[in-house]
Structure formats: C-alpha cells, structure tokens
Image: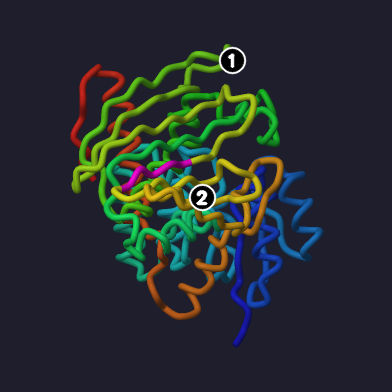
Amino acid sequence: MSKLRIAVIGCGSIARHRHIPEYAAHPDVELVAFCDVVPERANFFANQYHATAYSNYEDLLANEKLDAVSVCLPNYLHAPVSIKAAQSGVHVLCEKPMATTADEARAMIQAAEEHHVFLMIGHNQRFMPPHQKAKEILKRGYLGRVISFRTAFGHPGPESWSVDGKNSWFFRKNEAVMGAMGDLGVHKADLIRYLLDDEVSEVGAIVDTLAKNNTDVDDNAVCILKTKKGVIGTLAASWSYQQEDNSTILYCEHGVLRLAEDPVNQVVVSLHDGSIENYQVGAVATNEKQVTSGVIDDFIHAIQTGTKPSISGEEGLRSLSVVLAMIESSDKKTFITVQP
C-alpha cells in the first residue's frame, strides 16, 4: 500500500504539537507540503520533512497531488479552506470549532459529500483515555442513567500556547469570532454529547470578557444545558484559570463518575453503596503536556478503509450548534433551543 500524501495548512501551535508529529509518526503517511502565511514557519517543516513550502493554500492545492489535508488555521478560515480542499478532491481534517456559523458548517459538509471525500473535525477530547474509559463504564449500565453533570475546561489563555503569544489571532474577533467558547467550550459540548450519547436541546448561558484586556472576544462562560433525554448540567469555559481544569463529573442513579480530577486515578467511580473504583488509564492532554490525540489515527483509518470518520462534519456541526446557542443565549439573556 502506498503512503498517503498529506499536507498541513497552517503551521501554528496545534499543527506543531499535534498534527505534524502524529502524521510523521504514522507509518502510512508522507508529509509532502506545508503552508503558512508566515513563510519561515512553512519552510521550517518543509526542510525537516523534505517537503514543499507554500504561503498560499490555493497554490498548494493546485500544485500538489494529495490524499488529505489538515486545516489548522484561524477560525474564520476553517470553512473556505476546507471547502476548497474538498472541491479539489482531498479528504479534510479540520480543527475545531469547525466553522463560525452553522451555514458555513453545512456548506463544508455539502462540499465533502458532493466531491466524495471525508470531512473530520478534530475533537480530541473523545479519544482521551479517561473519557474513553468513562464511555465504557457508562455502557456497562451499573451506574444507571445519568441525572446531571458538571464539566469545565479552563486555563490561563492562549498567550502561552499560540506561536504569536499575546498577538495571537485568538484575540482578534474578526479572525476568531468566538473566544474561550470556540477554543474550549466546544470541546466540552462535544464531550458531553459523546459521553451521554445524547443531544443538547436547550441552553442558558452567561458569556463575557472578564479577564483579558487585549480582546473583545469572550474569555469566560458559565452555561446550563438540558439534553433531549432530560439530563441537566453545567459547562464552564475560561481563559482565566491559572491552573488548568479539564474535569467532568457525572452524577448517576447509582453513583458518581469523576474524570480528570485526580492526576493518579484519572477515573474514579464512587458507588452509593460506599464502594470506590479507581482507574489509572492515562491523563488528558494539556497545553504543557501533549499526548497522542487519536484524531490523526482515526482520520487515517477512515481514509484507508473507506469508512466515515467517527467525528464527521455532522458531528462537528452538532457540537458547534450548542456553542452558538450558548452565545445567543447570553446575548439575548434567555434560554435558547439548540438548532443543529
């Protein structure tokens, strides 16, 4: 089997820490091209992997014979670049949030369908070991139904993560469109959907800028969610937590399931009969300590087997719709019905 020819469009932090090293580690992948508007970034990786560097993604798509691309760009470029790649007959792995509007997301899905390529969205929380173990425990059924939940994702902000630091596109509303909600909140919206095997039907939220004085995008949010099956819970997203919190608690009929709270026992089940189950399954990824995401492997497997990626464009749209509803709820100061 010949190796899949992959290009990475956007050579910022998410490409540097996840996409590029994970592609490079895959035995069935050849990295053939890199693109970035800052030529030095594309050149750096092109030299490292004996590939071709571009500063214009349209030139890359026109000149290279590709199987797939990763789109690792500011949020406002996710849709146009992904659509152009799909129209070029190339499979697309796009970072989250998949788009800035539901219409953009639908256009991405339509382009992939019309040109018979796969579209996958990089929601890596689903593949993190504690979350995979939690899904397994919930499926076993001994905890009964989930009644409520609390999930949070917060850290000090993109300054220490982005290659541009305080000057990052994350803080420019015309490029990011949404702040902590698009960066972190969408992760947890997707995770709750995945863990509960349920859809969020209604949300209420306060989404605000409280901590950062260099931006007009949101940096803190607290949200209330209700699912179609009647589960209620809270979701928090923040760029002002000085210690990272990526935890989730599920309150069930027969016990409590705690995820990513304890650095040793990453999954803890506290049953109502007093018994405790501790699982050491591996930690969630952090900005400071990246672990293999599982996203790249899933994407490559989908292409090789001709099976739809587990986190399809449709899945990405459902999670994006939750976040968009939260932002609308905050703007209108009322509860909003989620429209996928």
Decide if residue 91 is on the left or right side of residue 289: left
Residue 199 location (% of width, % of height)? 25, 48
| Direction from residue 277 to residue 262 in the image, left or right | right
Q: Quadrant of the C terminus?
A: top left
Give the amino acid at mark 1: Asn
Residue 204 in which image quadrant: top left
Question: Residue 157, image x and y in percent?
Answer: 60, 28
Please tell me whether residue 215 belongs to the stretch shown in magenta.
no
Secondary element under disc 1, as helix, strand or loop, is loop
Depth check: give the residue in front, 276 or 145.
276
Instruction: Decide if residue 80 is in sight here.
Output: no
Q: Secondary structure at mark 2?
A: strand
- The verdict on residue 249 being magenta is yes
Q: Nearer the viewer, residue 148 or 122?
A: 148
- Please name which of the two marks, 1 or 2, marks the residue nearer to the observer: 2
Determine which of the numbered discs, if any, sits on residue 214 in the image: 1
What is the distance, in whole Å, between disc 1 and disc 2 at their CAs? 39 Å
The residue depicted at 42 percent of the width and 17 percent of the height is 208
Q: Total label count?
A: 2
Marked residue nearer the N-terminal end (1 or 2): 1
Give the prevailing secondary structure in the magenta stretch: strand
Crowd around label 1: few <14 · some 14–19 · many ≥20 (10 Å): few
Is 87 situated above or below 146? below
What segment carries the magenta color?
Answer: 248-252
Q: Is residue 221 visible?
A: yes
Residue at 47%, 26% in the rendered image: 174
Q: Is residue 112 above or below residue 317?
A: below
Disc 2: which residue: 268
**Seen in the image, is 46 located left or right of residue 309?**
right
The image shows residue 49 at horizontal and vertical percentages of 77, 64
